[in-house]
Image: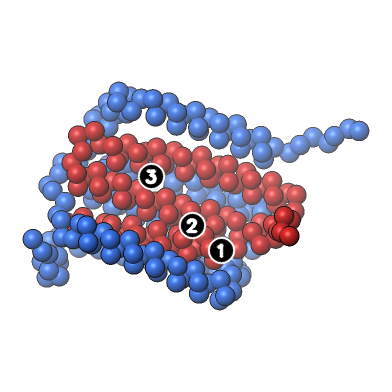
Amino acid sequence: MTVTISEFFKESANWAFLAIAVPTLFAGWRTVTSNNIVRAVLYLVVSLGGTAGLFFMLGAEFVGWTVVLVYIGAVIILFLIGIMITRAPLGQEADLSHAMNVKAPAALLSTVVFGVITWAMIDAFGNNMIPPFEPTATSDLSLLLFDRFVIPFEVVSFVLLAALIGGIAIARQDEEVVS
Amino acid sequence: MTLIQFLIVATALFSFGLYGVITRKNAVLVLASVELMLAAVNINLVAFDVYLDDPLNSGQIFTLFTIALAAAEVGIGIAIILMIYRNRQSADVDDLDLMKG
């Protein structure tokens, strides 16, 4: 079964998909190219919000809201604190990227990576449709998380605890050593 | 909806993140590019979870783990950048060439 372009645009869900995907990709592109450091981080917010929108489209509501809470709520704040504490050039254009001698090979490499992965995926999955699905119930997800996946869940909890303690230990101002 | 449209968006975001990791000079923006790559992987995981109609929802569960690990990574990363800035008065990855021969 093949999907032509006109069939693609007949499905209303695909219009919603495009309305989410195009801003996501644009914001992702500006995140890595913008010359204003605060704007780059704020474009990252739009891009991550777009991924949350794609999760909602796929019926993964709990995961989508987790992305909104953890990424947009917490991680972006960490980024903004990071750029303010390191006295990055706030609110002005600055040279944040390498010169062309790094940009050109990087563009080539990422284009090749994109091309190869896309080719492999089209080769493998072609026009396979996503079967009709119900939104994933949060209760199902939590039952699985505390039953089948409880040991990985505990391991991740310990990793987070270790990261918390490690972050404090690294960033703490050492007291003056009295010699 | 086809599966491939989600996969292509994820691949494009991953390539943007890869480009950013290589070209960005500021260490915080390198971390932001890594976040972009992780978000792309999450899209793939959830798309395949729905596509395969997995009764265990492994894709979504692993996305939750990825999000937790990404949060831990950013916390440690910002702490390290803060420490480097305190010692060397710079967050530019090119200035950290102390071990260059």
Label ID, residue B24? 1
The residue drawn where x is 49% and y is 57% is B33
Instruction: Locate residue A42 relative to residue A126 in the image: left or right.
Output: right
Instruction: Locate residue A43 relative to residue B45 in the image: left or right.
Output: right
Chain that is blue in the image: A
The residue under label 2 is B33
In-front residue for pair A32/A1: A1
Q: Are marks 1 and 2 in contact (CB under 8 Å)?
A: yes
Same chain assignment for discs 1 and 2: yes
The numbered mark 1 sits on a residue in which chain? B
Q: Is residue B18 visible?
A: yes
Q: Amino acid at mark 3?
A: Val
The residue under label 3 is A67
What tint does the image give chain B?
red
x and y, in percent, of residue A6 in the image: 11, 70
x and y, in percent, of residue A66 in the image: 37, 40
